[in-house]
Image (cartoon, rainbow, N blue to C red):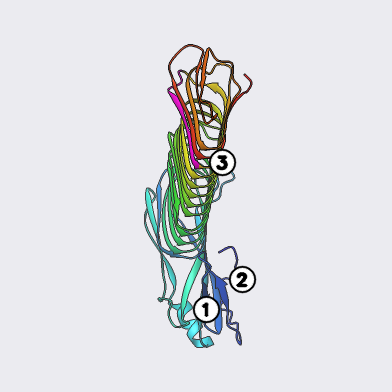
Amino acid sequence: MNPRAWTAALLGAALPFEGCTIEWKEGSGATARMGRVQAERVDELPLPIAQGGALHGRDLAGDVEVRVEEGSTASAPRLRARWRGWGDDAAAAQQALDAARIEVTGDAASVEIRPIAPEARDGFGARADLELVVPAALSLDFVASIGDLVVHGPCATASLDTRYGDVRVDAIDGDVRARSASGDLDLSAVGGAVDAETSYGDVTVRACRGATVRAQSASGDVAVSEGGAARYVLGSRYGDVTLRGGSGELEADTASGRIAVDRFTGSVRARDSYGAIDLAGVFSSVDASTSSGDVSLRLEGIDGELRGITLDSKYGDVELVACVDLAGRVTAATRYGEVRFELPATSVRREQDGARVEAKLGEGDTPIRLATASGDVRVMKGGR
């Protein structure tokens, strides 16, 4: 995995390292301890997989990197396994290494890779990092107990699951499913649907063009950018949620963090418990609320027919910067604060204490509701 640095291995040779205990950090931050002696070996195997086939990896326990080679200069598909065996002495380390191998089964249409190794226990065991060179248009399906999963396409589809490690993917023509119990997810240039979820880590999605983008973290930031027309479902329990660009439908949720949306076109529903919500774009509807934090909307235009705007905070300021085409019935209210209404309106009704304003903007009855229990409400004129 990323934090580890290993000495170079010699093909077919076991190299003992004596007199030290080796530790490394797993994706969760836990420390695993090897035996006092380590041995290494490199195996190189052919992969009987054809372009457009399915490649499966099972019982993986180590980093896996997949690289696609195309064109007349592409070499034959192959696998390189960098084995490490360890034990309390040289004999135990060599014993673990000798018992380890890669099992490759299947044919050109479908191949399964499965490392076979002694179970890691009591400072004794073996694991392998894998490097795979493959043809284009494969469907990938990997499951790992520990280790990073990295894919450099183009590939057809990818399903990547690791308990402790990062997942990094680029250039997938179809759907991608990525899972980690503890690690970051980084996906870019995906042509199909994205379904990415981690328990402890950040999720980053860039330039993905599928019809759905689902990105979730239990504890980490979620950031999506340069997307196309899609349904976006973005959420974090403890982290920020950010969307830059794209169009369609957005659902954004976080229990503790900031929600920020910029250059988006379409409808937005945003929910936050402890954090601010900042929205800017061309919208058909906006429904944004937070229990504690400011809510800000910069309406840069209207996507089709405006269905409604609701901005709500229990403890925080609420602000609407309106485009010139905004029309409807505005209700702006606060319990503890003041309302500033700076738009030209056909009618304005203001309560004496200044805590509630009702106004009619242009033609139409589209509901525009701005409210906070404790904070100021501002309705201001913008551009466009």
For badge 3, the amino acid type reads Gly
The spot of residue 146 in percent (x, y) is: 46, 65
Tell me if residue 312 is in the magenta stretch: yes
Task: Name the mark on residue 33.
Answer: 1
Residue annotated with mark 2: 6
Q: Mainly helix, strand or loop, the magenta region?
A: strand
Which of the two residues, 337 or 45, is positioned nearer the viewer here?
Answer: 337
The residue under the point 46% across, 21% down is 306
Q: CA distance from mark 3 to mark 2?
A: 33 Å
Q: Earlier in the sequence, mark 1 or mark 2?
A: 2
Q: CA distance from mark 3 to mark 1?
A: 44 Å
The residue under the point 56% across, 72% down is 24
User: In terms of secondary structure, where does tag 1 sit?
Assistant: strand
Q: Earlier in the sequence, mark 3 or mark 1?
A: 1
User: In terms of secondary structure, where does tag 3 sit?
Assistant: loop
Q: Residues within 10 Å of mark 1 (few under 14, many from 20)?
A: some
Q: Residues within 10 Å of mark 3 (few under 14, many from 20)?
A: few
Q: Is residue 199 above or below residue 370?
A: below
Q: Residues within 10 Å of mark 2 (few under 14, many from 20)?
A: few
Residue annotated with mark 3: 71
- Is there any visible trace of residue 324 in the rendered image? yes
Q: Is residue 157 above or below residue 39?
A: above
Q: Which residues are magenta?
A: 305-314
Q: CA distance from mark 1 to mark 2?
A: 15 Å
